[in-house]
Amino acid sequence: MQDGGVTVESVEVAVPTRKARIADVPTMHRLINQLAEAGAMLARPLSELYEHLRDYCVIEEEGAVIACCALHVNWSDLAEIRSLAVEKGHQRRGLGRILVTACMDEAREMGLSRVYALTREPVFFERLEFTRIGVSELPRKVWGECFRCPKFPECDEVAVVYDL
Ligand SMILES: CC(C)(COP(=O)(O)OP(=O)(O)OC[C@H]1O[C@@H](n2cnc3c(N)ncnc32)[C@H](O)[C@@H]1OP(=O)(O)O)[C@@H](O)C(=O)NCCC(=O)NCCS
């Protein structure tokens, strides 16, 4: 374990996650927004990454952050897994699974009962045993945040949930 993170055994080697630090933010910003430009996920401004830095964990390799993910608490029983981004050249190595598992462990530790994601990659989450649901089944998310989204109410993401 490093710096409050968790270690999950992957097929070949244990890859540690750690909580994000201020110095990681420019790299996380580039990582998320490059994938967002390619249409894979929502962009995040720097201000939001700094404000929500404590939500984020990262995976670092040879001194560089190559993947990140956030766990954002919405309510007493609900948290969102969001801004999951794995650098293109490092995808399909199990890093996404490790980060989501770390966020789920953190949510469990906090006493939350459900995590969800809004995603364009529902099959990835289904591999992690999440289940698809309608976005309208997440009213706290919809009325707390989605209604500010420029795409609202024509959401092109799929909601997936996991009961902890
Ligand atoms: C989606 C993403 C996070 C997956 O991360 P990853 O590290 O490549 O995924 P993993 O290697 O941990 O894959 C875990 C499992 O999901 C499967 N998987 C991964 N990406 C998949 C995809 N796009 N479609 C279907 N299955 C996928 C893997 O084959 C693996 O299955 P297995 O355990 O049965 O072998 C990554 O591709 C990414 O950053 N994409 C761009 C941004 C994005 O879509 N983020 C999600 C926003 S919520």
Image (cartoon, rainbow, N blue to C red):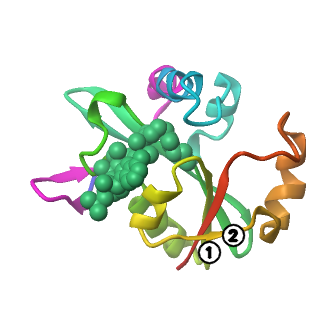
Identify the residue at horizontal 43%, vertical 56% (top origin).
Answer: 124
- In the image, residue 25 lies at what x, y percent? 51, 26
- In the image, residue 161 lies at what x, y percent? 60, 70
Left or right: 9, with 84 as reference point? left
Q: Is residue 56 above or below residue 106?
A: above
Q: Which residues are magenta?
A: 3-29
Q: Is residue 7 above or below residue 56?
A: below
Question: What residue type is disc 1 on?
Answer: Arg
Q: Name the quadrant of the N terminus.
A: bottom left
At label 2, counting other C-alpha atoms closer than 10 Å, the crowd grade (few under 14, some 14-19, many 20 or more) is many
Indicate which disc residue 78 carries. 2
Left or right: 149, with 1 as reference point? right
Q: Is residue 97 above or below residue 65?
A: below
Determine the CA span between mark 2 and mark 1: 5 Å
Depth check: give the residue in front, 38 or 161: 38
Residue 13 is inside the magenta segment? yes
Asked whether the residues under the numbered discs 2 and 1 touch, taking CB atoms below 8 Å apart as contact, a structural biologist would say yes
